[in-house]
Amino acid sequence: MENITIIDNGRQQLTTAGFKPELFEDWTKYLDATPKTIATYTRNIRPFALYMQLNGITQPSRDDVINYRDQLKDQYKPSTVQAYIMAVKLFFQWTAQAGIYPNIAEKVKGAKLDTEHKKDYLTAKQVKKVFETIDTSTLKGKRDYAIMSLMSTAGLRTIEIIRANIGDMRNVADFTALYIQGKGHDEKNTFVKIAEPVEAAIREYLTARGKADSSEPLFTSEAHRNGGERMTTRSISRIVKERLKAAGFDSDRLTAHSLRHTAATLNLLNGGTIEETRQLLRHTNINTTLIYSHALERAKNNSESRIANAIFG
């Protein structure tokens, strides 16, 4: 195939006149990331490969990327559009660095994301109501109560719950901590404090479960086909959703992740600082934590009532 020279920022880059579809697979093989991250990027680049195929595009241009983005906006929510465009941008960044194809996606904008949380949180009374509906006379009930107590007080993600082992519960200073492998981390290099009522619930569950090695999962499945095995994020999400519904809280905006929002919000409402909440949630960027603060500040703003009182007396 004929070669052409493309000028990019004053440098010459050699590229082929036709675009090779197998480049997408080559890119995923090049990625230095966890298998889960590679799988995500592989999934997110496929729609662009399909878009090129359906439109007969053999030599994609910047306009093709922009048209693809605009088409995505008509079909998907902003977060999905952003994820798909990010994959395209990283892909063409790689092709340019490798001298294979110019970076036609440079400075192409994705979708504007809403900084407000997509999930609701529970009030302290609502959390208590959920806990009261859990029958802790059964092993499953003891487990679910312990899981939801831990998520609601320590702000843990579902992935952090399933990664936890019994031996990750350790003494630090004068309290019991749970060492966790956080999002984007390869090791269990940070911990959360386990509140006394939560620790009591976890130990009651472990006692009822029976003798177990420290390397075994902290929480295990009670299903017939995989009983005693490590749980999945999907199973944790399903358990939380079922427990919320049982307490009368059936909403698309209430999920397992809502318990993390609950922990952050209740901490701020009860005197916790922004920095303390950032540490609790293990946010790298404090601006992420500030979203909670802004929402609470607006909730405390009684402007509407003052205006109504001025008008209606």
Image: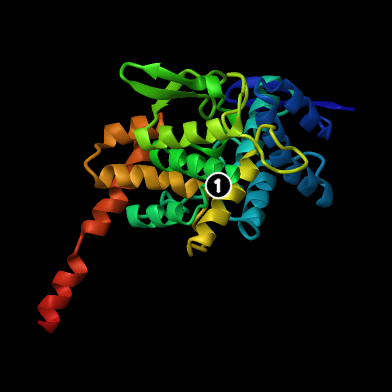
Q: Position of residue 226 (x, y in %)?
A: 74, 37
Residue appearing at x 56%, y 29% in the figure: 218
Q: Residue furthest right?
A: 1
Q: Position of residue 7 (x, y in %)?
A: 65, 26
Identify the secondary structure beneath mark 1: helix
The residue tagged 1 is 141
Q: Is residue 81 left or right of residue 292?
A: right
**Quarter holding the N terminus?**
top right
Residue 109 visible from this viewpoint: no
Q: Position of residue 255 (x, y in %)?
A: 52, 52
Q: Quadrant of residue 174?
A: top left
Q: Amino acid at mark 1?
A: Gly
Q: Quadrant of residue 223?
A: top right
- In front of the other: 13 or 257: 257
Q: Is residue 265 left or right of residue 4?
A: left
Residue appearing at x 26%, y 47% in the figure: 269
Say above or below: 54 vs 213: below
Count of residue discs: 1
